[in-house]
Amino acid sequence: MVVLPLTSALCVALTAHTAFNLTKLRSPRWSGIAIDEKVSVLIPARNEETHIALTIESIRNQIGLTDVEIIILDDQSTDSTAAIVQQLAAENSDITLVTNDVNPPSGWLGKPNACNLLSKQATGSVLVFVDADVILEPTAIAACVELLRAEDFGLVAPYPRQLAETHLERLIQPLVTWSWASTMPLGIAENSLRPSLSAANGQFLVFDSLAYSTSGGHTSVKGEVLEDIALMRSVKSSGFHCATVNGSELAHCRMYQDTDALVNGYTKSLWDAFGSPAGSIAVNALLAFAYLVPPVAMMTSRKTSTRAIGAVGYLSGVAGRAMVAKETGSRVVPDSFAQPVSIAAFIGLNALSWSRHLRGKNSWKGRSI
């Protein structure tokens, strides 16, 4: 059987690349020297009453910043988000509440529109976009701004540590970081202006304001479901280098609170992840080829040699997942051993995403996508 050795070899190669890639992964640390420029922290919020106060508190607890403004946009929330922020703003002069009472203009999705409105209020030379459910460690912003300036980047994109509690979260959430850590050559990506070498997480983005405005900011990605990756591509296309970095010690976030939210969250965007139906089929076929064929052969074949080759592929996949998990603060054991199940679940979510998209059934926070 020629296919099995190929699949196992592919797993070994990807894991070897992951090991090398992780040596290039930056983990920003603050030197202790205060940031002497104005930083605008911008938070889009829609129905975030359970998170918003904690997020704002974590931002107000930042150290190393000498001049900071915190601007929150309440985007037609139907809960007490606006009231919570309004109270905090009344007590703290560095907090500003902006209210948006109208639907996004034609051609705009909700989050890009909210972030665009926020950017118009900002006066800092550094723009930090933070989702309303992200908790920052005290040196998070200073560390990222320091790296932004030291390396003359247009954008620093830290990936926060993804908290996962339910079984499906533990299967899917680690793949967010594993996917780019195992495939995108980080050392090359930092020195390349190729838009295709982009990975970013919109939960936490740190821009040079000139790079942001020159690239068109969120206006350039107004209709993009995956606006974070599109933003990095736009910044690179405008001539600015970018860095995807390990933010697991800088910030954390539980993206989805239950299984239904996770399914809805991923299905709203996965259809757009690989460009087209053909692209999705190709990527998912490759994932199945690399990460499902070896464990199936290992468990079902009667031949010792076949089981051994399958085991090599399976354990290589586990090793790659475990290395990324250890580096980025995710559970290593036993979750890494479920890598084939994670891949199968991801493929299922991708198929469901396309099904909903083609039927016009995808939505998020009450808005159609």
Image (tube, helix red, strand yellow):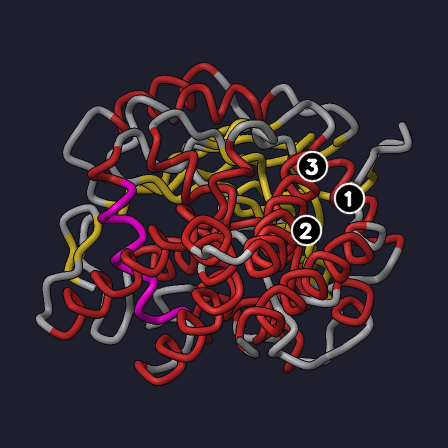
Q: Which quadrant of the structure image shows residue 196?
A: bottom right
In the rendered image, residue 269 lying in the magenta stretch gets the answer yes
Q: CA distance from mark 1 to mark 2?
A: 8 Å
Q: Secondary structure at mark 2?
A: strand
Residue type at the position of mark 2: Val
The stretch of residues the image draws in magenta is 262-273
Q: Main secondary structure of the magenta part?
A: helix
Quarter of the rendering occupied by the C terminus: bottom left
- Classify residue 243 as left or right of residue 132: right
Q: Secondary structure at mark 1?
A: strand
Q: Is residue 267 above or below residue 211?
A: above
Given residues 86 and 110, the one toward you in this image is 110
Q: Is residue 244 above or below residue 223?
A: above
The residue to which callout 2 is attached is 126
Given residues 302 and 101, the one toward you in this image is 302
- Classify residue 139 as left or right of residue 215: right
Q: CA distance from mark 3 to mark 1?
A: 12 Å
Measuring 39% from the left and 44% from the top, which residue is drawn there?
A: 44
Q: CA distance from mark 2 to mark 3?
A: 10 Å
The residue to which callout 1 is attached is 37
Given residues 100 and 325, the one toward you in this image is 325
Measuring 46% from the left and 63% from the top, which residue is drawn there?
A: 293
The residue to which callout 3 is attached is 141
